[in-house]
Image (cartoon, rainbow, N blue to C red):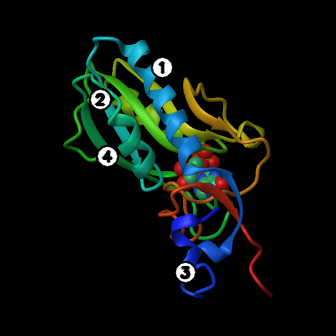
């Protein structure tokens, strides 16, 4: 299961021992991201667009996705945060799009790690439209539709999570950690 990491599995500082279950392996993710990129290529064809990566969570997904795109894209990086710590959104999402990002009249593909309540992508979408974007489409690695609080149209989705389990890895964190897991998984409950 953790072939390369096995020697470190029971070494306390290693994160692999905290994983309860692997939902999507590195190989399964790789295949799916390739398929998703195919859909994006087909949707934009020869139209240029701006790929807006929502940091921090989407860094790994975006890095893999854009390497499959032949289009001349511009990449910009935006910030969104709604968690203070833990596993539930604590506050209204704060979105930061640098002033230098100019999307006037441009097509924007917003690349997100996960759409949960939908509030973050909605806030980013609105901000891009307010700055004059011609269109904003959303590409999310994961979707948790059962948790939605605002209706959002996610045009490209990697995986729809079957329940609302909190997941980590492939860019997604728990309290800032586990982003570097190469797969997507759930964590064991912390020991009391
Ligand atoms: P939303 O605004 O509720 O849709 O929240 C989106 C943000 O919440 C994502 O960009 C993630 O940073 C975070 N998030 C939601 N669910 C999870 C999860 O299962 N694991 C890690 N982060 C999550």
Asked which secondary structure carries label 3, the reply is: helix
| Dot 2 or dot 1, earlier in sequence | 1
* Cα distance in 3D space between marks 3 and 2: 41 Å
Q: Nearer the viewer, residue 55 or 30?
A: 30
* Cα distance in 3D space between marks 3 and 4: 34 Å
Q: Which residue is pictured at 58% across the width and 87% down the height?
A: 11
Residue 163: x and y in percent read 79, 46
Cβ of mark 3 under 8 A from ligand 1 = no
Q: Is residue 36 above or below residue 99?
A: above
Q: Which residue is pictured at 56% across the width and 68% down the height?
A: 84
Pick the quarter of the image with the N terminus: bottom right
Q: Which mark is residue 50?
A: 2
User: Which mark lies nearer to you, 3 or 4?
Assistant: 3
Residue 127: x and y in percent read 40, 36
| Dot 4 or dot 2, earlier in sequence | 2
Asked which secondary structure carries label 4, the reply is: strand
What residue would you read off at disc 4?
Answer: 77
Q: Nearer the viewer, residue 114 or 25?
A: 25
What residue would you read off at disc 1?
Answer: 39
Q: Is residue 178 visible?
A: yes
Question: In the figure, residue 89 lies in which quadrant?
Answer: bottom right
Residue 4: x and y in percent read 51, 67
Q: Residues within 10 Å of mark 2 (few under 14, many from 20)?
A: many
Determine contact: label 3, label 2, CB under 8 Å.
no
User: Which mark lies nearer to you, 3 or 2?
Assistant: 3
Q: Which mark is residue 8?
A: 3
* Cα distance in 3D space between marks 1 and 3: 38 Å
């Amino acid at each position: 299961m953790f072939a390369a990491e096995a020697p470190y599995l029971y070494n306390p500082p290693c994160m692999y021992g905290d994983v309860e279950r692997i939902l999507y392996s590195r190989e399964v993710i790789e295949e799916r991201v390739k398929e998703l990129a195919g859909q994006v290529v087909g949707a934009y064809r020869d139209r240029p667009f701006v790929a807006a990566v929502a940091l921090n969570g989407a860094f790994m997904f975006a890095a893999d996705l854009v390497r499959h795109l032949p289009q001349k894209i511009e990449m910009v990086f935006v910030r969104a945060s709604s968690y203070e710590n833990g596993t539930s959104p604590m506050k209204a999402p704060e979105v930061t799009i640098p002033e230098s990002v100019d999307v006037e009249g441009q097509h924007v593909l917003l690349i997100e790690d996960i759409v949960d309540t939908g509030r973050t992508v909605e806030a980013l979408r609105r901000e891009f439209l307010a700055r004059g974007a011609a269109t904003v489409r959303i590409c999310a690695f994961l979707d948790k539709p059962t948790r939605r609080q605002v209706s959002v149209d996610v045009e490209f989705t990697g995986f729809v999570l079957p329940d609302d389990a909190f997941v980590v890895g492939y860019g997604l964190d728990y309290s800032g950690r586990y982003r570097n897991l190469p797969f997507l998984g759930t964590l064991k409950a912390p020991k009391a």
